[in-house]
Amino acid sequence: MSAQDTPSKLAGRLLAWYADMGVDAAIQSLPVDWLSRADKPPGCDFSMPGSEPAAPAPQRERPARPMVPPPAARAPRQFTGRPAAAAEAGVPTDAIAKAHTLADLKGLLDRFEGCGLKATAKNLCFYRGAERAPLMIVGEAPGRDEDIAGKPFVGRAGMLLDKMLAAIGLDESSVHITNIVYWRPPGNRTPTPQEALACRPFLERQAQFVAPKVVLALGGAAAKQLFDVPDGIMRVRGKWREIELGGTKIRAMATLHPAYLLRTPAAKGNAWRDLLAVKAALKADQ
Ligand code: URA
């Protein structure tokens, strides 16, 4: 700050600093005084199913040995926990099971407080496209444009997705597009496994209504969550597998996320190969 700074210059520099810190959208017109809400941060009522409350961190104690076990001893990453565990986390599993339509499910999501992302998001982003569709596309998480519009994949990545779908003869009348979480993570970070897990029972029921022949996961985060695998997208993409979603076995594939393709156009060939495989699978099933 310099003595010559006018209030408007200062405000401009403050806004620039916010933008550098990743604050790229105003969530509400008035600031929220989180400190006046006692000691409860957003989403604090949600806990990982079966997990113990975290012990307070030891003060300035350094572990005598490295915390990371050698690779051979490291347990495989788990992306587990379906309906039984979800009930413990405050997910309304009975109401979800009783939902008759996607509109019922949306009503439950509107009232659901078990996913911390809701506290900072502007809107619920449930789905766009057909209610029942042969292809169900599942991305990572809503971004800024989606948060504002309240619909998945409506920004630049969504526009590319629409072009990719048009190239294999599909549009909103034949696809159902959603994400592994229904609210925008702050700063567009990757949703945590816990956040995805909290949304998962809704996604399972959603899949029952959509009744897709094929599920296409977009990007590594969606593939990890849907396929229960620890591998990165480059290893996972382009391979058929059978997943259980909504109690039904469904053919599924992962491909590169359109946001990645926008940054890395040279990878479009791989995504094109995957889409042609999806097109062939949809045709074969007809
Ligand atoms: N990226 C996603 O994964 N989902 C969206 O809805 C938008 C961008």
Image: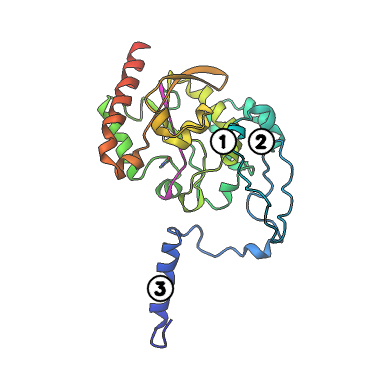
Q: Position of residue 273 (x, y in %)?
A: 29, 25
Part of the protein shown in magenta: 134-144
The tag earlier along the polypeptide, 1 or 3, is 3
Q: In percent of the image, x 57 and y 39: which residue is there?
A: 193
Identify the image quadrant of residue 128.
Answer: top left
Contact, CB < 8 Å: mark 1 with mark 3? no
Contact, CB < 8 Å: mark 2 with mark 1? no
Q: In percent of the image, x 62 and y 41: which residue is there?
A: 112
Q: Quadrant of the N terminus?
A: bottom left
**Mark 2, residue position:** 91
Type of amino acid at the residue the image marks with label 2: Val
Which mark is nearer the camera, 3 or 2? 3
Type of amino acid at the residue the image marks with label 1: Pro
Residue furthest to the bottom: 3
Packing grade of label 1 (10 A; few <14, some 14-19, many >=20) is few
Q: Position of residue 141 (x, y in %)?
A: 47, 41
Q: Is residue 22 left or right of residue 200?
A: left
Would residue 21 be counted in the magenta stretch? no
